Amino acid sequence: MFRPMILQSHIPFDLSQRPLPGVLPLDMADWVQVDDAYAGQMAARIAILAERGDAVLRLDRSALPAAQEALALVLAQMAGMPMFRVSETAVTCPDGRVVSIDRARPLETLCHLIQEDICLMEKRGAEHVLTGACLCFPASWMLAEKFMRPLRAIHTPVAPYDDVMARRVQRLFDGVKAGRPLWRFNLLPYHDPALYQPRSESDRRAPETVDCAPFLRSERQSILRLPETDAVLFSIHTYVVAAPQDK
């Protein structure tokens, strides 16, 4: 399955490392972003969804209200963005596509509107569980292995995610307030610039270093509380850029 290389011209935030989990307050006006790779990333998303829908789109029946609230929130956000035209039934996107609004299939509609991948995390007992997601651009993980699993199990193969970190992240998800979103980022060197890179927990990616990798991949991860359903919406805007040559 050939896909053209889709790169942004730059990563538009300070990449200075912060202590984990590295969260900062997010201005809601900056949540949904449109960058210079919008058309390319959206074409890739639509193709991946058509070809591998079962692998990248999952929604537990109980999470439908949260997914519908997420769609309503995105539509309200886009109504204030001049590059989108939003009506009751459709959205005209920056690349000229007209996307019908299907409130019965909220995550699929979102997949066709925004560059961000969307994960819905809902409290089940002591932890938040991944009850729905549209994950077209996985960075070395698989939705099938994470769906309906709690935070600690989702992060099982992540080396820094020990008991202390697990408690800190759970407190973060418990504490995020409606109207006061948060964000963080990661930065990983990659030899392969492909956006769709699923990988099983049992098949870990070999370590790469910034010094030799030709591409840098960064996820801008936003954490929002949905006020009506109390779900946490975790969105991921993926940037892939050519690594600087003056190393």
Image (cartoon, grey):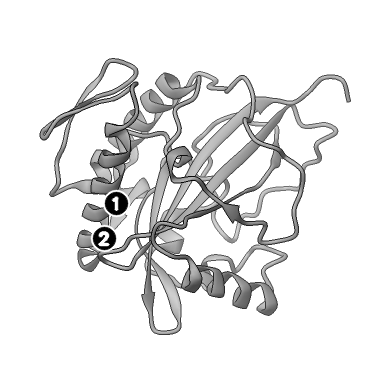
Position of residue 54 measured from the top left corner of the image (x, y, whole percent)? 30, 48
Q: SS class of the residue under badge 2? A: helix
How many dots with numbers? 2
Position of residue 210 measured from the top left corner of the image (x, y, whole percent)? 80, 36
Confirm whether residue 135 shows in the render. no
Label 2 environment density (alpha carbons within 10 Å; few <14, some 14–19, many ≥20): many
Q: Looking at the image, which residue is at 33% across and 60% down? A: 226
> Is disc 1 in contact with disc 2, using a CB cutoff of under 8 Å?
yes
Q: Looking at the image, which residue is at 45% across and 62% down? A: 146
Q: Between residues 160 and 183, which one lies in front from this camera angle? A: 183
> In the rendered image of this protein, does residue 8 appear above or below residue 172?
above
Position of residue 30 measured from the top left corner of the image (x, y, whole percent)? 47, 38
Residue 84 lies left or right of residue 236; in this view the side is: left
Q: SS class of the residue under badge 1? A: helix
Q: Between residues 15 and 110, which one lies in front from this camera angle? A: 15
> In the rendered image of this protein, does residue 122 appear above or below residue 36?
below
- Looking at this view, name the residue that lies furthest to the top: 96
Rounded to the nearest whole Å, what is the CA distance between mark 1 and mark 2? 6 Å
Query: Which numbered tag is attached to residue 2?
Result: none
Report the residue marked by disc 1: 70
Label 1 environment density (alpha carbons within 10 Å; few <14, some 14–19, many ≥20): many
Position of residue 243 measured from the top left corner of the image (x, y, whole percent)? 74, 26
Q: Amino acid at mark 1?
A: Ala
Residue 175 lies left or right of residue 90; in this view the side is: right
Q: Quadrant of the C terminus?
A: top right
Q: Amino acid at mark 2?
A: Ala
Confirm whether residue 184 shows in the render. yes
Q: Looking at the image, which residue is at 25% across and 42% down? A: 108
> In the rendered image of this protein, does residue 132 appear above or below residue 211?
below
Q: Looking at the image, which residue is at 38% across and 75% down? A: 123
Query: Which numbered tag is attached to residue 66?
Result: 2
